[in-house]
Amino acid sequence: MRHTILLSVLALLCASAFAQHEKITGVTINPDNSVTFRYRNPKAVTVEVSGEFMQGSAPLREVDGVWTYTTPPLASEMYFYGLTVDGQPILDLNYSMVKDIPRWMNYFIIGGEKGGLYSVQDVPHGTVASRWYDSAMLQMRRRVNIYTPPGYENSKKSYPVFYLLHGNACDENSWLDLGRAAQILDNLIAAGKAEPMILVMTNGNPAQQAAPAYFGDTYTNENTRPGIAPFPSTFGEIISFIDSNYRTIRKKAGRAIAGFSMGGGHAFTISKDNPDLFDYVGLFSAAGSRISDPAEKQKLLDLKKSGCKLYYIGCGTEDFLYRSVLAYNKQLDEIGFPYHFRETPGGHTWGPWRIYLSEMAPMLFK
Amino acid sequence: MRHTILLSVLALLCASAFAQHEKITGVTINPDNSVTFRYRNPKAVTVEVSGEFMQGSAPLREVDGVWTYTTPPLASEMYFYGLTVDGQPILDLNYSMVKDIPRWMNYFIIGGEKGGLYSVQDVPHGTVASRWYDSAMLQMRRRVNIYTPPGYENSKKSYPVFYLLHGNACDENSWLDLGRAAQILDNLIAAGKAEPMILVMTNGNPAQQAAPAYFGDTYTNENTRPGIAPFPSTFGEIISFIDSNYRTIRKKAGRAIAGFSMGGGHAFTISKDNPDLFDYVGLFSAAGSRISDPAEKQKLLDLKKSGCKLYYIGCGTEDFLYRSVLAYNKQLDEIGFPYHFRETPGGHTWGPWRIYLSEMAPMLFK
């Protein structure tokens, strides 16, 4: 109570002075794109910063109880960062946060080419809706996030649909929060680089109704449950829901599917099991994609025969799945299955996945 | 990078073990609705917890490097809480968080009557959409959150609209994140207590396009700017946008407006300046409502004459605006203006505002 009354009263009376007082951490993006971290705590013994912009960590130096560290100039990107104080990770409670798998993380964006694409620009914005559909197969209400492009509501035309799937322990919010999917599409569409399209971001954990955080739950990794249908086998329900609730182009030329990690495995399975559904398939750091027997091989040949226009495979060279992705590519080569391979620096992280979305979306529906 | 690669790889391989290892804080709601806070840090000297469930703060006690404190059994509610370690506020990075004014806060919900109403239950859920409208008066694109009730999409009927306004330094996300508006309406509608209605949650800071957090910005208190139109004067644009994009009941019997703090002041101004727009008005801990001159008095008499069906005034007895709310009620008494006054324990906080929403919504559109 104390905290909140204080917050509200003070915020009402003199919010900026209060914020100034309350703020013990700070991030400043300098004109040269170096970043200064600041942490006020005279009692701390060691303060370190780590983040996606460095290997390992770096110590902050203390002057008059204020600890600081300035990075070298950073490339345009969205970066996670974290402070560790006397061995304990802490969050900057005044700064931007997203939830990545089990925990909240602070982040900042350095403007420029990539960071600009991931940021909210002054361009027309699509609508992002969180809706619920009834899954007969999973016998539950399930949450799905849907991006409709600028102009959707005031048009009568039908739009193509890009289904975006997530990795293990992620959820229907991940492509929005960490993948910056709405910003990327807004910006690509405004620049005339991508066709206006609907994005559908499902929850790929068939044991979940929605993101655990949506229920106020702490982290859970329950992505399946004995006796429950595997997620790919239920995907037809989602397509039906979208096709009956949105003005969609209801044929394979109007559908794309992509996912990262477990979601890349889902995209692999769903596309090969349903060769007539998607003209565009994206496997980003995909887990579990391999041609295991003649039946699998035949399914991929059917997908090829059906005229799948783009089979996009992306993987970071430091990704722990890099070798298995290369092995899958080799299997595709052996059966003459055409694909587009994009390899980037980076590991099994959002940096490469945002790049693959940014590069794949302009290749769709043209 | 290190952090994220580690997170992703480990999460993929053995997420729960990792979460176990990573977790240094914890909240357990015990069967008797007492709550145990846990914090692992052998080096800490003092650890305290504070929250909306207590006055002041309480010390955690350490055994083997793990600090704990258990509250008495708590009443059903949603509660903010915070730990302070050696004088520094910290966040529980594994637990539920919302942004309240300038900073992120952890929270938990105790089930039961109120907490149940504020939680996601297994009932039909409305859709929550974040959309953008063009404001000609403010010359900017602006973000608005819209809740449509369960069944809206598969119906042809028109729905009444409840406009929910926010307080100073809050934004269009506040009623959803802290006010639990979608959960409250889902649950009231499912119980047959409230009519299905559309909720419109605007950004009441005319200098802002959207919540600062949406841009990845740190906290800002810029709620106006010299030369910019006051928010209430622009409200007609929002009503036009909603009426032309949703199946609404386009008359005063189909419109309600309410807000807290600054938003209560907005609801006061908008309703008296437009006596033909709303049959239902709610002022929660309203700031600035008073009858200052004969013209103001006449506007309120016009509102009364127009047949405004409910003028709901709510305030906590510990609210710093309590006396000014009582003074306003007295002014209403003097002009014979009928109103419904609801006073609750509590201060200028979300606890009372959630109660007022929960109690006012069932009184609307009947």
Image (cartoon, coloured by chain):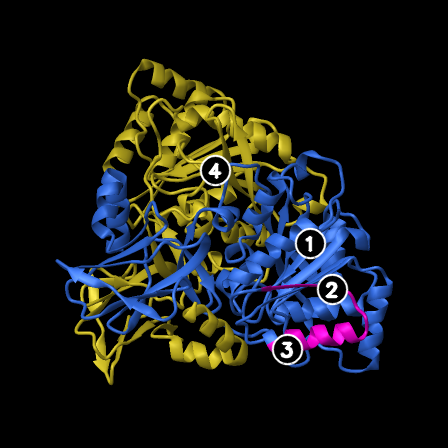
Chain colours: A blue, B yellow
Q: Do labels 2 and 1 touch, CB within 8 Å?
A: no
Q: Nearer the viewer, mark 2 or mark 1?
A: 2
Report the front residue among A208 and B280: A208
Report the front residue among A319 and B200: A319
Q: What's drawn in magenta, residue-wise?
A: A323-343
Q: Nearer the viewer, mark 4 or mark 3?
A: 3
- Is residue A26 visible in the rendered image? The answer is yes
Which residue was labeled with disc 4? Answer: B202
Discs 1 and 4 share one subunit? no
Residue type pointed to by label 2: Tyr
- Quarter containing the N terminus of chain A: bottom left
Q: Do labels 3 and 2 touch, CB within 8 Å?
A: no
Tell me the SS state at disc 2: loop
- Spatial CA distance of label 1 from label 4 is 29 Å
Which residue was labeled with disc 2? Answer: A339
Which residue was labeled with disc 1? Answer: A162
